[in-house]
Image: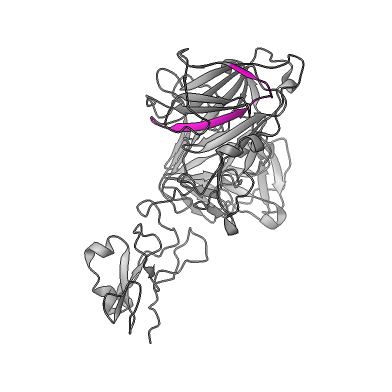
Amino acid sequence: IQFLTTGNTATMPINGTIRNSHFVGSSSNRGNQFTSAFQKINFIEARSDSALLLADVIQMAVTLYDGPHYIENTTFENYISYPCFNYYSTAFGARAFNTFMMATTTQSTNNKFINTEFPVFMYDRVSDGGKTTLMLDTDGSISGQRNAVIAPDWDFYYTPSCVRNGGYGLACPQRYNNIEVVQIDGDGTNLAKYGELYVVRANLASRSGGLAPPPPGLSFQGQYIPAAGGYLYHPSLSVGATYVMGFTTRTPPILRVNIVNGQQGDTHTIAFSYPRGTIITSVMNVANQALNRATSLLDRTCVNCFFYDSTLDLLVLRLKQLLPRIDPTLPCPASGCDGVVVRATFRSATSSTSVTDCSTRGAPLQTLDDAWLQTSFSNKESFSLDMPINLDWCQIGDPCLESIDVGNREQGILAYADFPCNGIGCYSNKCRYCKLSFSASNQPFLPCPFETRRATGSPTTTPSSSPVSPSTP
C-alpha cells in the first residue's frame, strides 16, 4: 500500500491510516512462472511477484510517502529477506529516489511482525526521503522502546542512548521535527544553481579519552516547490539540539526557515554559515515583526531571537513554536508555522556565495555530552521485547530478594543473598541491595546478578530465558 498525500506545505488535515489489517508477504501460494507487464518471477522466493514492485526496488507492505501515516493493530507476516543476496523485504519502507518531505509525525502502534526480519528498512541511502524517513514507535512494538523515534542508521541521528539494530535502524529517545529551509526565489527553471544544503549536528558524544569526534553531518538535495516560494530543503532536526548549515553552491539573499509538525514549546537552535563579508539586513518572523537580538553567539536565554557573528559570518537562530497545532495531522498552528525570513546583502554580486566550511565555523557552538545527548528512555517507557512473560522471580528462592520492601521494589531496587556482605549496598551481613538495568534510581548499587538474560532470537518470539540465581559461597 502507498498513500499519496498533499505532502509539502499541506493546507488541510490529511493522512493515511491502516488499522486492524493483516499483510502477508509470502505464502504457500507460489503463483506461476509467467512474465508480463504486471507480473515477474521471483527466483529467490520461488514464486511470482507483482511487476509493480520493480518501481521501488524492494518489496514493502507499506510504502511511506509524505505522511503522516498511522499504522495500528496490524500484523505483518512472512516478509522474507536474504541480506547475503542484498535482498530485502520489509513491513515499512519508503519510495526509492524519493525527494519529498517525510512527516516526523508518522506513527506505528501495536503492530506485530511475524517471520519478518526487517520491520523497517530504508533501502535508499541517497535521496532526501531515504535520509529523513522517521517513525514514532508509540508502544515499542518495533524496537521494544516505547515512544522511540525509529530513524535511518546515520551518525547524524545516532546518540549513545539510541538502540542500533539491523532490523529497523535506530531507536532513539530524542524527538524530531521537520524543518523547512527555503531559498526564496522565483526561478523554477535553472534548478542546478541552488545546489545542496549541508547540515552538521553540534551536540557531540565524547570518545575514549574524552576526545570529541568530528560533527556528524548529512547533505540534502532539496527540490523546487512553487507553493513554498522557492527551492525547499527539509532536514529532520531534533528538538533541543543545535545544528549548523551551509549552502554548498548558492547561499540565498532571502532565506525562510519554518518549524513543521512541531509541538507547542519546541525550541530549535539553527545556525547558518554565510559568505565572508555578508551583512544581515533583517530577520523577521511570519508576522513581519523583527526578531530580538541575542546577547552573544551562545545566548540560550532568549527564544525567537537571533545573533550574527560578523567575524565568523555565522547567523544563529533560536526558534520556538508558540502555539499548538489545531489538528494532529496538520503541520502548523492555525496562524501558520512558526519561522523567520532572513534577508542578507553579500559583499560582491559576482563572487561565489557557496559555503563549505560550516563545521569549522560552527565549532564555537559545539557541546560535549550535553543534556540533549544524554536524553534516555525512562524505565516507564522502555522495556525490552525479549523479556519472557513470566520472570519466575519465585523460583530463585533467595530470602533477601523475597523480603525486599515495596518501596524499593517499585524503584527497581531488589536484593540478593551475599555472605559475608561488605561494601556497597549491604544492609546486613547476609543481604545486598542491587539495581535492575532499567531502574531510574540514582543509587550506586551493583547490577542484580539474577536479572533476566536477553534472548538471542527474534523479538517476535517468546524467549525461554528466565532469571537465574546468583552463585553464593
Regarding residue 67, the answer to whether it shows in the image is no
**Residue 142 vertical placement versus 428 (above, below):** above
- In-image side of 6 versus 85 (left or right): left
**Residue 444 vertical placement versus 275 (above, below):** below
Residue 279 falls within the magenta-colored stretch:
yes
Residue 278: quadrant of the picture: top right
| Colour mapping used in the image | one colour
Q: Which percent across, then down, holds residue 408?
A: 26, 64
In front of the other: 102 or 78:
102
**Residue 438 vertical placement versus 149 (above, below):** below
Q: Which percent across, then down, holds residue 319?
A: 47, 27
**Residue 364 vertical placement versus 378 (above, below):** above
Q: Which residues are magenta?
A: 264-280
Residue extending furthest right? 350
Name the image quarter holding the C terminus. bottom left
Residue extending furthest bottom? 473
Residue 155 falls within the magenta-colored stretch:
no
The number of callouts visible is: 0
Name the image quarter holding the N terminus. top right
Determine the residue positioned at 51% across, 51% down. Answer: 162
Q: Which percent across, then down, holds residue 269?
A: 51, 32
In front of the other: 276 or 382:
276
Regarding residue 138, the answer to whether it shows in the image is yes
Q: Which percent across, then down, holds residue 430?
A: 29, 81
Residue 28: quadrant of the picture: bottom right
Determine the residue positioned at 39% across, 59% down. Answer: 438
Determine the residue positioned at 58% across, 38% down. Answer: 364
